[in-house]
Amino acid sequence: MILLALPPDLNDELAYADHFVQQRLGARPEVAKLSQRYLASVEDLKLRAALVLLAARPGTATIADLGHAAAAAELIHLAALVHQELVDEARRRRGTVTEQNQWEHGAALMLGDYFFALSAGEMALAPDSRVITYYSQAVMRICEGELAPVMSATPLEDALQQYFYKIGCKTAALFASAARAGMAIGGGSDAQIEHLGEYGYQLGLAFEVVNDILDYSGTPGLPDRPTGRDVQRGLITLPLIYAVHAGGGSDLAAVVDTHEPAQVAWAVQEVQRLGVPRAWAEARRLIETAQSHLEAFPASTARQQLHDVAASLLRWQA
């Protein structure tokens, strides 16, 4: 499921950028084989590349100028997914290591590192050297976020600070860097680059908030999509934080990291009732903030497309 609706006229440009990703991965058969597990399971694989391409549209860049920067964004995303899975698995095992999962851990670690190396190669081929700066900053933020999980749903101010820092590092930083890269290659001014970067950052925050909401509310049109996975994985997200402080209290906070079906079902119901409405209000605020940064650009088809991409997140609200 891809949360953001992308313009249909972007398909050919995305295919061009994806060609570089597949070319890099296909050069080493053993890497290509290991990669398939991740490529097959990533639902939003091309969103970061799409942001590079869309952010460049108000400017003068051609697809030939943008392909490598778009490919780099996706390779960074792949690397981050591999490393994030390793961290999550280590937390689930809680120190229990077998010979088999130790080998799998090492192979996955090297694969993630390899993706990062491939992304560096693509960055170096981009026509604007600032792309390297933008993406390196995103990689640092991604790593920092993995080292800073949300520890508790209380007190409220601390929980919100930890949550938004976490998703800012995990997702919004790369969204912002992709948008900056596209605008820079497109010939934008420093001010325009920063506005597109802020658009990307706020969009990335909204993207994560909506994704976290759907884990509790379910996905319209996809009734078989499971809910309550974040509770089972021990993840404290915005809907849960709001629900705890809207009456759920310590009983709800204590359910985190449970695998008991009855407790998971109760937590999902409580968060739907107490936390989801306020989380949707926050998502709308973030989307509107993202869209406000587009006002720095003259009215155009490109600006409207960026506006509509952000608005498309709201179509998941039941």
Image (cartoon, grey):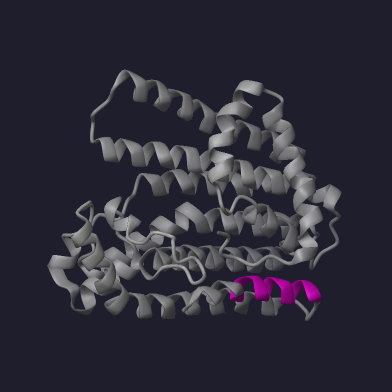
Residue 195, located in which quarter of the rendered image? Answer: bottom right
| 85 w.r.t. 210: above or below | above
| 137 w.r.t. 204: above or below | above
Q: Position of residue 125 (x, y in %)?
A: 77, 38
| 188 w.r.t. 249: above or below | above
Q: Position of residue 317 (x, y in %)?
A: 48, 77
Q: Is residue 99 visible?
A: yes
Q: 291 or 9: nearer the eye? A: 9
> Which residue sits at x=49%, y=79%?
284
> Is 168 left or right of 304, judged from the image as shown?
left
Q: Position of residue 293 (x, y in %)?
A: 63, 75
> Which region shows up in magenta?
301-311
- Identify the main secondary structure in magenta: helix
> Which residue sits at x=39%, y=59%?
226
User: Where is the N terminus found, in terms of image quarters?
Assistant: bottom right
> Which residue sits at x=46%, y=68%?
219
Q: Is residue 78 magenta?
A: no
> Is 178 left or right of 83, judged from the image as shown?
right
